[in-house]
Amino acid sequence: METYSIPEIAKDVFCVGAKDWNRRMFDALIPLPQGTSYNAYLVKGQEKVALIDTVNPGFEEEFENKINMVSSLEKLDYLIMNHAEPDHANAIRYIMDRAPASVLITTERGVKMASLYHELPEGRVKVVAEGDTLDLGGKTLRFIEAPWLHWPETMFTYLPEDRVLFPCDFFGAHTAQGIYDEDLEDLIPLAKRYYGEIMMPFGKMGAKALEKIKDLDIEIIAPSHGPIYKNPQRILEPYAKWTAGETENKALIVYVSMWGSTQLMVKTIAEVLMKEGIDVRIYDLAVSDTGDIARELVDSRAIILGAPTVLAGMHPLAVYGTYLVKALNPPAKYGVILGSFGWGGGALKQAGDILVPSKMEVVGTLQVKGKPREEDLKKIEDIGRELAQKMKTT
Ligand SMILES: Cc1cc2nc3c(=O)[nH]c(=O)nc-3n(C[C@H](O)[C@H](O)[C@H](O)COP(=O)(O)O)c2cc1C
């Protein structure tokens, strides 16, 4: 192909990455309803040229062509690695083999992580640390260590002359649609979904990174996935809330049910909560997209798990759901566990065991033999009312 869209996001700063329209799964974990993009940026100074990050395996040729359309890959001086994950770093060798004088720039942690997955050209790596700069001639790249977002080695790169921040995955969104934030009305829910899946487990590190960049003069945020923010506040404001763990008066119900008993239990608590003015979101694990659940987890104040017993433990989908909730480390304050069993039970205990280390207060649990009766539903109504009370007074 000879024609490419190569957005010039600031003078002599080009987005040379690739869009992956049809990708539907990431990390063998995250569904991608709108595909994704692997954004990489080329910065042309008066003397030197630098590339910030690379692309996912399979997009090397497109990447190379784009670089050659705005510059010359052969003459590339620097390759900046903000993050070692293969969707951004796998093409390091491909690029550096074709740019013989190029030097890889990353942090000490970056070198360690990248060496685990990629073949780094010997003697062509320069280690940088917090605050170090690289002069390209009229354009400076400043490096900001922002570890654990979401791997140990992550860093941001800042271009003060054009006031552009390149934060790699931080502030990202999985979508192949649009170039700039203004193109997508539904961008923030997508960014929230991405935050829930990728950044929420590291919320404290995210808050530290925000603190670090709070005085930076930022006109453009150019992340590694999704649209580029011409209006940085559009993503900075929600990130401030999300990393602070601010919750809404919202209860998230995730459940699975084979014959409707657990479903009746969760429906009962949902009705009570809604009657009490709580915003309720319900997801059946058998048919739901885990990305939607991750998005809801970002600001839900309570999580209600509905898990029937299968083979002396939770239904396998509930095991997955419960484990996901725990692993994503959401800020929810309250939890409820409900479920039906036929003879010996076991789901409740297993759910409790998985959730024990979380900081949620378990407001109520109920395990019912068979189909829930009137008295069982009354108990659930009581749990629902108590939960609503706690949620409203928080
Ligand atoms: C495949 C299968 C395995 C089950 N294993 C157990 C079990 O080990 N212990 C138990 O108490 N009940 C077991 N049950 C019974 C269910 O827990 C019971 O039917 C329950 O009411 C189902 O709730 P639900 O309609 O919400 O799915 C099993 C049911 C199925 C279909």
Image (cartoon, rainbow, N blue to C red):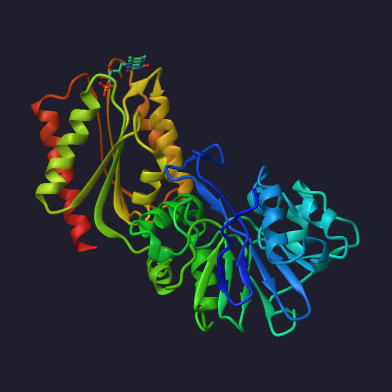
Q: Is residue 27 left or right of residue 384?
A: right
List the single residue furthest toward the right.
Answer: 123
- In this rendering, the answer to whether 10 lies above or below 311 is below
Across and down, in percent, residue 98 comes to 83, 55
Q: Is residue 96 left or right of residue 352?
A: right
Q: Residue at x 41, y 44 (%)?
A: 291
Q: Quadrant of the C terminus?
A: bottom left
Q: Residue at x 62, y 55 (%)?
A: 151
Q: Residue at x 17, y 53 (%)?
A: 278
Locate residue 389: give its quadrant.
bottom left
Locate residue 372: give its quadrant.
top left
Q: Residue at x 75, y 47 (%)?
A: 117
Camera-nearest residue between 19 and 325: 19
List the single residue furthest toward the top.
Answer: 343
Camera-nearest residue between 219 and 247: 219
Across and down, in percent, residue 272 comes to 12, 44
Regarding residue 114, the answer to whether it shows in the image is: yes
Across and down, in percent, residue 333 comes to 32, 55
